[in-house]
Image: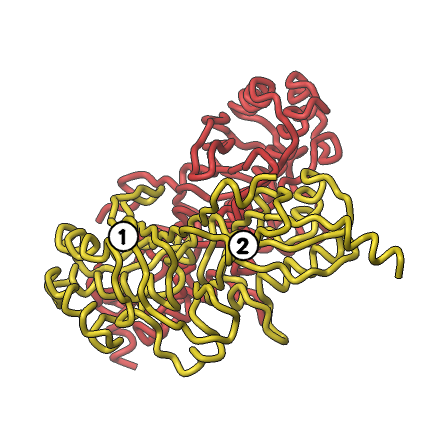
Chain colours: A red, B yellow
Amino acid sequence: MAEDAQNMANSRTWKLTLAYDGTEFRGWQVQPGERTVQGELQAALRRVTGEAPMPQGSGRTDAGVHALGQVASFALAAPIPASNLQRALNGTLPVSIRILEAKTVPPTFHARHSAVAKSYEYRIFPGELCPPFLARYVYASSWPVDFAAMQAAAKSFVGEHDFLSFVATDPDLTTRGAEDEAGEPGSIARTAVRTVYASAWEHGMCEAGGLLVYRVRGSGFLHHMVRNLVGTMMAVGRGQLAPGAMAEILAARNRSAAGPTAPARGLFLHSVEYRARDEDL
Amino acid sequence: MAEDAQNMANSRTWKLTLAYDGTEFRGWQVQPGERTVQGELQAALRRVTGEAPMPQGSGRTDAGVHALGQVASFALAAPIPASNLQRALNGTLPVSIRILEAKTVPPTFHARHSAVAKSYEYRIFPGELCPPFLARYVYASSWPVDFAAMQAAAKSFVGEHDFLSFVATDPDLTTRGAEDEAGEPGSIARTAVRTVYASAWEHGMCEAGGLLVYRVRGSGFLHHMVRNLVGTMMAVGRGQLAPGAMAEILAARNRSAAGPTAPARGLFLHSVEYRARDEDL
């Protein structure tokens, strides 16, 4: 008992930055009987430290969604140096999850509550011959698209808007909550108002040629929001919707006004931003 | 009967160029109860044409080995246009196999017997933090390596040599034959003499930084030969062997003289070359 109390008093809060291939997991969040990133990370922490805190993610990612820079936080009593923790976790985690950075942060730091901005990236392979080595990491679409029209649509999302038309209406929303909702797990999004700081398409490159890459940075994102934005902009790119229709779709505050949900495999959580004062010891 | 004879008389020989992610298959060659590239391709041909010729590969690739440009040949009676065959096969094959080109060739063309040269590529990610999106397609090694020493070793393999020291000695060699042996399946390699036209390391790039890429082009390759060359050159890069030892290892004609077998996941069959007169109608 005395030892436990001593350990708690000495426990440190950790921030991990991690990348993962979402193909191999039923999303971030622990679910009974499913292989999830959160579950794998907790099991790795137990193997390395003997402690099993539940790592809190900056937000949930759905099955098949990837991360280049997800952030997780938790407390550990073990006085392990940061570089050792990182190396030991990478030594025991599957190669589809990599810890990019491990650092100790103030006890008030929380990966979700402290986040001030997030960036996502969506990758499209345009053409019929998507290389097998990319197939898990892009949405392959052979429809010709009007890049300028998609770019114009993307600009419409910059600013503070009510994104209710782009929120998942799946029946398990109340139990799952919104993907990025800052409230407690299980709560429904209280408002769909979010601020998008940047929203643009770029031409990316891969070994097999050009990619279309959508980058979006905002205060927070609702469940399926990025995939619904992309699906709607793809409809614009294909001429099924006018770029100018985005304002009406936002105003409708109705999921059925927007386009389809783009597949999970093209989506990457790119990075999560925090204030220096919240994460620096 | 008359119709069958008519179909045979009208059958055309096809050359397919294909890429695949070897992670998902137990290698190229059909094996009972296993998922193989040859088996998937034959099943796709059956679904598309109603015929099920056994596609002959330019050589076998082992489980986990990838292809950027494998070649297969077979005959079909169905008078299907090339672009339709390619599109229909890509529509029914798993996304981990893509047909890059389909063309008709003279009836004497055979993907293995007609091949005059092959190129392989081996990709190494140097460092501790291999991105999850690359992990299936590179050998991740955090050992520091001496690039100049590996390059000197690579040069030793150019020319005509007996590569017996680099041939797999696994017990199933007699039933599997050599990976690239031009004889019939099941035969053992009659000679390990091969000509290497080019053998060099290059600095490659990926999203996550530098890669080490070994490129080798030769008249033919024996079972595990490229992976054994790479494993031996990695030992040179780590200072465990001198670059000058390559000549002695070749002269030894003994597998135990060379280094370990590098993992399958870094190996790509890059391309197969044919004489224009053998493949042009």
Residue at 47 percent of width and 63 percent of height: B61
Does dot 2 land on a helix, a strand or a loop? loop
- Residue depicted at 26% across the width and 58% down the height: B160
Residue A111 can be seen in this image: no
| Residue A182 percent location from the top left of the image | 50, 45
Q: Residues within 10 Å of mark 1 (few under 14, many from 20)?
A: many
The residue closer to the viewer here, B260 or B208, is B260
Q: Position of residue B76 (x, y in %)?
A: 72, 52
Eye-nearest disc, 1 or 2: 2
Q: Is residue B204 visible?
A: yes
Q: Is residue B77 left or right of residue B2?
A: left
In the image, B256 versus A14, the foreground residue is: B256
- Looking at the rendered structure, the kind of residue marked 1 is Val
Spot occupied by residue A223 in the image (x, y as percentages of width and height):
59, 44
In whole angstroms, how far apart are the C-alphas of marks 1 and 2?
A: 60 Å
Horizontal and vertical percent for residue B261?
A: 31, 69
Can you identify the residue that label 2 sits on? B111
Q: Quadrant of residue B190 in the image? A: bottom left
- Relative to B16, is B60 above or below? below
Task: Report the front residue among B265 and A2.
Answer: B265
Q: Amino acid at mark 2?
A: Ala
Chain letter for mark 2: B
Identify whether B215 is placed above or below A84: above
Q: Which disc number belongs to residue A105?
A: 1
